[in-house]
Image (cartoon, rainbow, N blue to C red):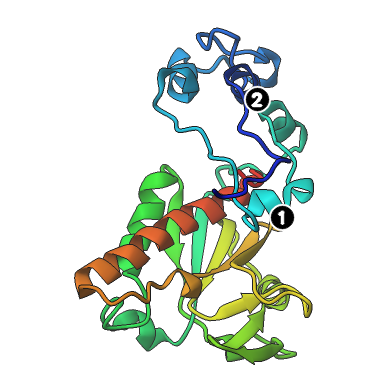
Amino acid sequence: RPRFCKKFMPRSMPQQLAAIGLSANGQTLADTQLYKAPPPAALGQCLDPSGGDWENIDPPEPDEWLDAMLEKTPDQSFSDFVASRPNRPDRRRCTVLLQPICAAEELQGPSFPAGPWPSWQFLEAAVSRFYAPMNVRTLPAVPMEELGRPPVQSRMNSYGLQWHAGQVLDRLAARGMPSDAYCMLAVTMCDLYPREEWNFVYGLARLFARVGIFSFVRHTPFQQADEAWLGAQLLHRATKTMLHEIGHMFGMKHC
C-alpha cells in the first residue's frame, strides 16, 4: 500500500467553502467587504465545490510537492489573496507576454515528436482563451546564450545543459518589459535548476516582479507509442503547466 503524507489532508467541505469565500451553504458570497462592487451571483455558483463539479485533491504520495514542501506552501484563502495586495491588470498593463527561450527555427519546425516543441500556436491560443479578455503576445525567440551579460550559469546533466533559473529571470528583468505588459512567462525546452544543491526545478516565478520561467523538457513522454499520442501527451501537459504558471503571476500561490 502507498504511504500517504500524514501532514496534509484534503480540506473538508466547510473548509473549502470558507477558503473560497462562500457561505456555509455555498449559496452566497461571504467576505463581501473585500469586493469593490457586488459580484454577480453566478460567480458563487461557479466556484461552489459542493455540487461535485470540482474534484477534491488526493492526499500526496511520498516526495510529491505537498509531502516535501508543505511548510513552504501554506494554504491561501481568498481573503489571504486579497490581503497580499497582488498585482492587478489595468488599462495600460493588459498583455500577457510569452517569451520562448530557444533558437527561432525550433518554433518554426514541426511539433513534437518530429520537432522539440509542442505546438506553439496551440499554446498561445490556449492562453488567450483562458486569460481573456487580456491580450496575449509572443515575443521573438531568444536562445539562452543570448539573454545578456554576464552569461547565465549552466551545468551538464542527463538532459544536456541545465540553466540557472534565477539568473534567467535576472536577465529577463534587465531586458525590461513593454509598457503594456502585465507579466512575462518565459518558456524553454532546456532543463532548469534554482541553486547548486537542487538537482532541478520545473520553473520559477517572481510574483511581484511579474516574470517567470518554466521548462517543458521533463514533461516529454519517453514511452514507445504512436507519434500522435506522444505529441498529444506533451501538448496536454505543457498547456496545463503554462496556464498554471501564469496564474502565479496574478498573486495565486501553490494550489
**Residue 147: in sight, yes or no?**
no
At 31% across and 82% down in the image, what residue appears? 108
Q: Position of residue 21 (x, y in %)?
A: 62, 20
255 relative to 96 in the view: left or right: right
Quadrant in the picture for residue 80: top right
Indicate whether 112 appears above or below 138: below
Q: Amino acid at mark 2?
A: Ala
Indicate whether 168 appears above or below 184: below
Q: Amino acid at mark 1?
A: Ala
Q: Which residue is mark 2?
A: 19
Q: Position of residue 151 (x, y in %)?
A: 70, 90
Q: CA distance from mark 2 to mark 1?
A: 23 Å
SS category of the residue bearing label 2 = helix
Mark 1 packing: few (<14 Cα in 10 Å), some, or many (20+)? some
As drawn, the residue found furthest toward the front would be: 1
**Residue 215: in sight, yes or no?**
yes
Q: Which residue is mark 1?
A: 68
- Mark sitting earlier along the chain (2/1): 2
SS category of the residue bearing label 1 = helix
Indicate whether 243 appears above or below 164: above
Mark 2 packing: few (<14 Cα in 10 Å), some, or many (20+)? some
Q: Name the front one of labels 2 and 1.
A: 1
- For this rendering, which residue is in front, 1 or 214? 1
At 71% across and 26% down in the image, what residue appears? 79
At 58% across and 64% down in the image, what residue appears? 178
At 67% across and 45% down in the image, what residue appears? 5
Indicate whether 182 appears above or below 164: above
